[in-house]
Amino acid sequence: MPDLRRQVFESGKTISRKAASREGSRRPSRNPSAQASQQSSRNTSRQPSDDEDGGYLSDDTALSIGSLDDLADLPEHDNTNWAEELADVIQDILERKRSSILSREESYAAFCRLAKCHFIDDHLRNRVVDLLAAFCKSVKFESSVRETILGLRALELLTVTTQDDKIYENVEPLLTRTIRDSTSVTAKTAAIHCLGTCAIFGGAGADGFLDQMTFFLDIVASDGQSIGADDDPGAVTAALQEWGSLAVEIDDLEGESEDAVQIFMDQLDSGESSVQIAAGENIALLYEKSYSPEEDEDEDEESEPEDEDESFMAAPSARAGPKLIKRYNAYHNTHELASQLQSLATVHSKHISKKDKKSLHSNFASILNTIENPRHGPTYNTAINQDTNRHYGSKMTVKIGRQGVMNIDRWWKWIRLHSLRRVLQGGFTVHYYEGNRAVLDSLPVIVRQDTPSDRGSAKRTARARNTRRWAVHDADSD
């Protein structure tokens, strides 16, 4: 492969007459003067809509245990000439010399849409270096906030699609500088997500993972001050989420667990539910990772006795799978942590919106369940019985397309799903079924379901299946 480092900011291309002609006629639905006016007058505190940013910012942290939706395709974006449109978009992106901010924003938005809705690896293999250079230039020069964010978004999709192991080493310095020095907090947040994605799918390796985890943990511990985003919930949430995504890739976190849990506990007092939930999920992951499957040499050692509470709370999938053995203490004071999580799982403050309150209850009941028994993964619609103080909920499954169900019985699966869902959004299903290795290698194989050909029968069957799937089972019945 050519050396990306030398080419990443080079471009000797000139715009052809054909491209110049197409530049003026392509995507006629946009009014250039109106868009220019909108660009100059837009309130920077307002997040752009899906049409403006390709759906990047609006997706945010919508995927949560308490509001899990089926992962669906994006048929409204599909068209029979998408490959031809993609070729035109790529040509527009690479013909940068005479392009305008508006035209680059348009091209990047179109690239993001097509990369989400289709697995376009075959169309990108010979253009990775050139596309990488174009996206990095937009991030470096920050001609507009929207162009910068769309450039970061396009870079994420390029990385997830191609999994080129040279990407991380070439973009890491630029992304780190953007996170630290950008004048836009929104761009900082987007760059945090982009850096995490490029590390995982762009060839960072274990050492790179740990380096970025330290970087992200510093952002969290300082409430964003270390990067000039003081008390910004978006930046802190992004750092928490990307820390968790990278932590999934590390087998042994014994050396990092104690300090990390303490920092995440401090974030449980945040006034933003997204920060609290992301911190809680990372804590659950660390407790989960303190246990690992039993090995042959463990059979001769005295195993840790399970008390009655651990036995009844053990997840069905955990009981059916390999026996999990405790390897180390995730945190020195689990009782204190459990008390704090219990408060969040039952919070009733009048200052919290009804939607956030519901999300906090469901998420933290599930997180608390894991802290009390790390063998128990995330559950859906989990709650706490106020009389018995017992947890109940249903096994978490996610519908993939029309005929697939994925069991999410471990926190590492949930965090990976959340990360990929944020990048691919509704196109997750397309990438799964079209063979994107970034998706297939990251998550368990789905279970296919037989769907009756008769539509009426299919609807009745689906209703019955959903009723069974989301039924709440009291843990005492186990």
Image (spheres, rainbow, N blue to C red):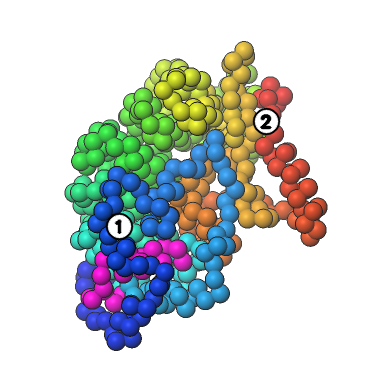
Q: In the rendered structure, which amino acid carries the disc numbered 2?
A: Val
Residue 402 placed where, x, y %?
67, 55
Q: Is residue 189 magenta?
A: no
Residue 108: say if magenta: yes
Which residue in the protein does label 2 denote?
472
Question: Residue visible at 64% across and 33% down?
Answer: 394
Left or right of residue 115: residue 258? left
Say which of 129 and 270 sits in front. Answer: 270
Which residue is drawn at the image coordinates 44% and 73% (left, top)? Answer: 86
Mark 1 crowd level (few <14, some 14–19, many ≥20, 10 Å Cα): few
Image coordinates for residue 328, horizontal then vertical, percent: 44, 29
- Relative height, residue 73 to residue 380 (above, below): below
Q: Residues under labels 1 and 2: Cα distance?
A: 49 Å
In front of the other: 459 or 307: 459
Near-viewer residue (177 or 442): 177
Query: In the picture, which quadrant includes the C terminus?
Result: top right
CA neighbours of label 2 inside 10 A, class few (<14), some (14 to 19), many (20+): some
Vertical relation: 127 (above or below) 379: below
Residue at the extreme top of the image, as rendered = 387
Name the mark nearer the viewer: 1 or 2.
Answer: 1
Which of the labelled discs sits on residue 38, or is there none? 1
Where does the magenta region start and end? 94-114
